[in-house]
Amino acid sequence: MDLRLRVRGWLEIRTPLHVGGIARDPAEALPVAIDGQGRVYVPGTGLAGAFRGWMGGVPDAEDPLRELWGFSPEPGDGSSSEGNAHAETDDLDDGQASRVVVRDAVIATSTRTDADGLPTDPLAPASLPVRHGVGIDRVTGAAATEFLYARTVVPPGHYLRLELDIETTAEHRDRDRARLHALLSALSSEQIRLGGARGRGLGVVRLLDSPLTVHEHDFTGPAGLLALLSGEPTRLEMDDLAGAPAELPDRRELLTVRVEWRPAAPVMVRDGEEGAYVGTLPLTTRVSGDTVALALTGSSLKGALRSHAEFIERTARAIDAPRASVNAPAREHSTAFLEQLDQLPAVKALFGAARTSPNPDDEYALGAGALIAEECVSRTRLPADLWDLVLQGPPDDDQAASEKTSGEERWTPRSDEGGRRPPPMPVAVRERLSALGLDQADHVAIDRWTGGAADKLLFSVLEPHDVEWEPIRLTVDLTRLGPDRDVALALLLLLVLRDLRHGRIPLGGMVNRGFGDIEVGSITLTGGAWPDGASLDDVLQTPGETRDALEEAWWTYLESAR
């Protein structure tokens, strides 16, 4: 090592983040990682894996980055160069440690640091929300047996401390500078995701421009050593890093889909928690310290698109979804659900497989899918103090029943006694919610004998009937699709997105109760055969080589599957 490139900065968490920790109780939600001091953090191994995966681009048998990120010898190589495909290039038969040092990243609520550069405001793990989800059985349309998911997430608006070093030599300094520039540029443009469930929109981070420092430590002479020891090493700007070729593998080819839409009926994903005054609340995510937004999770969007894709492929191929008998044990029902997810090759190529197929000849045992569905949030923002009232009622130090100034209605905290009707929502809270496009709706179950309201079966929903939403964003990794590219794109573009464009795919929860209908304004494709962007309507209505190739691939696939 002649020189060292050192980066110190912050990564802003843009979408919910989950990096798994050690679970004490398997019945509880998947926890986040906690370090020895009780702080929420992302291990350096998790960061290094994500960084290396992005820099690796399109897989290459030669792996030109192994001398940067390190490698282990292949099994059976021993200490001899015989059988080692890379022995002639780097003369390292026994492996090499990585020249990149990535430290654990503590998650904080601000970017303040102490005199030692450590975060002063670490995030408290007790305050983190939990995301719930279920698998939907394709036969019953209800929750699949034994498929309840719950994971603790770090909400957006928090920060990861980034500390990264690259050890280099005078000979390779310019190239390593360029590689560092490429990595930091990718982090600045949100191209690198961290943690789990990344295909469901989690883990998007962005490198902050400030505070950000890049220093170069020179160990080749007394001047560089003295500068380092005195705390005045050479500081580099981003432009100083980009002078030489980075010599990275080819970048992965991506297709992005942007869907402009508006709700034609209330659209929401149900929160796992009940409110103080309303039983069913829309899921929200905190976008800043004082505002929250409604959220359609990436898993919900991806699940809706996948279910419709399966419906299309099963219809085209005239095959039914596997099912267990009504009185079968729970294990048989869960096995049937896994078989449903593994049944359709074109859907698996696009959305992923439930598990790797045990059949070595199964060319569609791809594991993770090629499609990423980003979390979609509302443009309408709710004040955090208002949403806290909806969730928890008034603060504990308020009287149990305090008189409101707007009339005789009493503000009563939520009762913990089971079976009691929730207290009425205060007028002031209801009016503030209504101004933002949300209103409480109540309904009852009807007793089939009396024809009246059934006892203790009053339901209430806070309906977002007039809320504006951000566009739905999808990303398709065309490189991952490989030879299945045309078939998967035909299924997605010609069929699934076409039906979404025509309002045939409801989104969110309670879609059998009048929720989830949407109106799509436009769908724009960028990447692949449309590098400058094209609307889906133009792709479907304009004859051309691309559309003809997709149609031919789809019909050939259906014929071969029979």
Image (cartoon, helix red, strand yellow):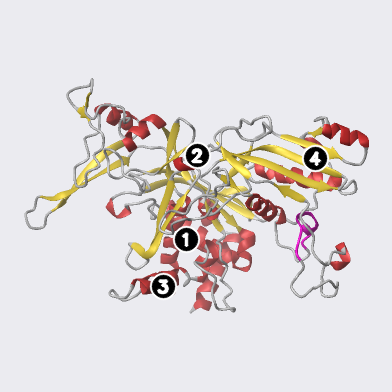
Mark sitting earlier along the chain (4/2): 2
Query: Between marks 1 and 4, how big is the CA–CA gap?
Result: 45 Å
Q: Is 314 contained in the magenta span?
A: no
Answer left or right for 514 relative to 531: left
Q: Residue at x 48, y 71 (%)?
A: 342
Q: Is residue 377 visible?
A: no
The answer to whether 307 is drawn above or below residue 435 in the figure is below
**As drawn, which residue projects farthest toward the left?**
450
CA distance separating discs 1 and 2: 46 Å
Q: Mark 1 belongs to which amino acid?
A: Leu
Q: Which residue is mark 4?
A: 241
The residue beneath circle 1 is: 495
| Of the pair 138 and 262, the residue shown nearer to us | 138
Task: Give the residue type that dot 4 points to.
Answer: Leu
Question: Which sits in the foreground, 210 or 190?
Answer: 210
Look at the numbered disc 3 and give the secondary structure of its residue.
helix
Question: In the rendered image of this protein, does residue 373 appear above or below residue 261?
Answer: below
Please name the residue shown 59% across and 67% down the image.
484
- Asked whether, in this view, residue 440 is left or right of residue 115, the answer is left
The nearer-to-camera label among 1 and 2 is 2
Q: Which residue is mark 2?
A: 124
Q: Is residue 129 left or right of residue 233?
A: left
Check disc 2 and give the amino acid type.
Ala
Counting residues from the start of the chain, the first of labels 1 and 2 encountered is 2
| Residue 66 belongs to the span the image colors magenta | yes
Judging from the image, what secondary structure is the residue with disc 2 in?
A: loop
